[in-house]
Amino acid sequence: GRLAPGLRSFHVGGPPEASTEANVSHGKEKQASVELPLHWSEWQLLDSILPTGGFAHSFGLEAAIQARLISSPDDLRTYVIHILENTGSLLLPFVCTATTSPDLETWHKLDRMLDATLTNEVSRKASTAQGSALLRVAASVFTEVPSLKKMREISLNFGDVAFHHAPLFGIICGLLGLHRGTSQRAYMFITLRDIISAATRLNLVGPLGAAVLQHQIAFVAEAMLKKWKDRAVEEACQTSPLLDTVQGCHAYLFSRLFCS
Amino acid sequence: MAAHRHREREREMESKIEAATGKLVVKKVGGKSTVTRCFSKYPLKFIIPNKVGSSETDAVWVYTLTYGGGIVSGDSISCEITVADACTAVLTTQASTKVYKSLGSKSSEQILEAKIGSDALLAVIPDPVTCFSTASGRHESGEKWDFELYRSTNHIFLEGDQPLFLDSVLLEQGSITNIAERMQDYQVIAMVILLGPKLKQIQIQVQENVRRMMSEQLYLPSTGLRPHGKTQSDHFLAKPSFVVSCSAFGPKGIGIVVRIAAMTTESVYRFLQHQLTGMETLLGVSPYS
């Protein structure tokens, strides 16, 4: 196992009991935060204003444009749908398992496995960048879940944890008390959100057109979710080898706005 | 290409081994890589020529042949190969693998499992898998990528079952997206894995070649999206006919994976031939030559 000696059975636990966690971590503070409905944290986690650096990544869209694969609004719509399908088939299993077992050992196992699964260097690096930023932000923001900070510190000390995005997103959702159905839908949502955002910055569509497109595609995204949710990580697979090949070309772009 | 794979669950492995259609063991005999065990049953056959290429190169070539020229529904062909320390073996197919439309709901499968010793090299050089939508095996018009399901899995593990490379591609006709739409005009996909210190020089060269090739192919179109669909036939705005990218993987980037999407099979052969000529010194003959 990867845990340090003495930490073999260290378990960072599931969703916090509202009352005990609040008492332990906030000392003299009033118990007002105990009554906070989950919606506040959930919506903040999905809000694009959360500083997780998602806007540095285009999910291969920038490379696809420079390979002239996108030359009409229909092409963009098709592209987004194919990325969502691939997110479902490849990444939802990691989100799901992490949400169901948000403990250190499960997280590290998923992280290692996803590191071997993301064979595309561009998407692998994007995943670790986004995952690291997400955990750093979550550990600072959701202080009522002290295990986030602890897990982060332990893993930084290990040195060989990649901090991939999908498992961490699942872990954070799980520790906040969200159900795996919610976390997987949320993961599809933030993927859709970020590609649409990239599309506007790449001048493929205006802000209003982007919003219209996002809502239209939401129906497709929900269908994708139903198809690909609640699967084991051993079943993770990619469904769009062309897009994978094209995204892998991102490093060859002479001029680029995005990291991936 | 070197691949090392070790299954995790022993019981499953044992039953798979018993059911294996083919087994090969390559060991050093008198200082030369030699096939010391060779077993196959219908529909699989191995052909092992006495000499392939230069006699100075220590490498044994094994050709696999499937009776009937193709795989039909319900076929499960599994092959297990062990390459002992310091040996070199090449596994290749005699002709393209043709997969015909399944009768009923049965699907067919091909499985290769390999164990590679230290300082050993296994090169797996298959010819393409061509999926036909009809039993006659002819492409009728409009039938590109017209099959129900194709799954390709390549898993590589290091000692102690450490996952190194877990690749699984699934092409399945769906109600929302069909395969032809996902593949656009690209008729061929391919993947090349080069793993291990013996292949370092080739890895470096391939990475550089791919970067140079694609840098010329990628550029910003001069305008944004046009509302009326695709632009006129303008060479400047046409898709590249050959798309390739190269990624490092593993600790210290000990491996590279090259992914290709192309419009013709010939262009893929040309690419492989060109990129892998450096393998001649290791294998005796250049792959795809």
Image (spheres, coloured by chain):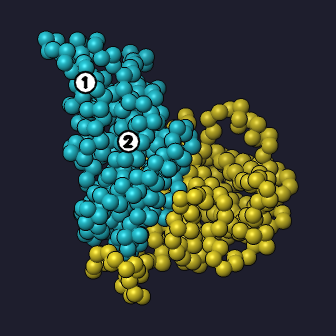
Q: Are marks 1 and 2 on the same chain?
A: yes
Height in image: B18 above or below A22?
Answer: below
* Residue in view at x 33 percent, y 78 percent: B226
Amino acid of disc 2 = Ala
Residue A160 at what x, y percent from top left? 36, 36
Q: Quadrant of residue B178?
A: bottom right
Disc 2 target residue? A186
Q: Chain of mark 1?
A: A
Which chain is rendered cyan in the image? A
Mark 1 vs mark 2: give the one in front. Answer: 1
Numbered tag placed on residue A36 in the rendering:
1
* Residue in view at x 55 percent, y 34 percent: B160
Residue A48 at what x, y percent from top left? 25, 47
Q: CA distance from mark 1 to mark 2?
A: 20 Å
Q: Nearer the viewer, residue B196 or B150?
A: B150
The answer to whether residue B84 is left or right of residue B19 is left
Which chain is rendered yellow in the image? B
* Residue in view at x 77 percent, y 48 percent: B23
Height in image: B35 above or below B259?
Answer: above
Residue B121 visible to an observer of this rendering: no
